[in-house]
Image: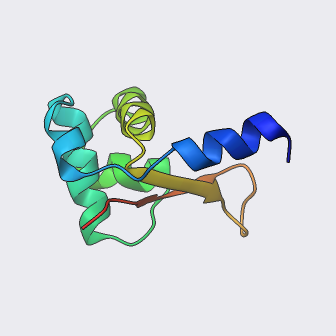
Amino acid sequence: MSASESLRHETETRGTWDDVKELPPSAKLVAKVLEYNETMTQQQIADETLLPSRTVRYALNRLDDEHVIDSRFSFSDARKRLYSLDIEA
């Protein structure tokens, strides 16, 4: 880990629901769906919310910018990412 990476990890904090309030409705919907489901793929989120995949991708990017979601690679299919909500209580 480089010095810039460790500095970035130290300065990044978990987001709160107040950070989500200012986001578009699609991001709020995705956050709520992730609140009730532990981990989901982008396709599962799209199926659950009935939003187009492109809108889900945009919402996930906005949530990631606010540091309210966590993403990791799926062990069963490395092409997919698993998303979960990471909000301070």
Number of numbered tags placed on the structure image: 0
Query: On the rendered structure, is 15 left or right of 72?
Result: left
24 up-or-down from 64: above or below? above
Q: Where is residue 71 in the image (x, y as percent from the top left)?
A: 56, 53
Looking at the image, residue 8 lies above or below residue 13: above
**15 relative position to 89: left or right:** right
Q: Quadrant of residue 51?
A: top left
Q: Which of 6 and 22 is in front in this view?
A: 6
- In the displayed structure, 21 sits above or below 79; it is above
From the image, which quarter does the C terminus lie in?
A: bottom left
Task: Depth check: give the residue in front, 48 or 57.
Answer: 57
Camera-side residue of 14 and 68: 14
Residue 16 image position (x, y, % from top left) = 26, 51
Residue 44 is situated, as x and y percent measured from the top left of the image, at 41, 56
Left or right: where 74 falls relative to 83: right
Residue at point 34%, 49% (across, down): 15
Residue at position x 37%, y 31% in the image: 62
Q: Which residue is drawn at 16% across and 30% down?
A: 22
Where residue 57 appears, as percent x and y from the top left, is 44, 33
Tell me, what colour scheme is on the image? rainbow
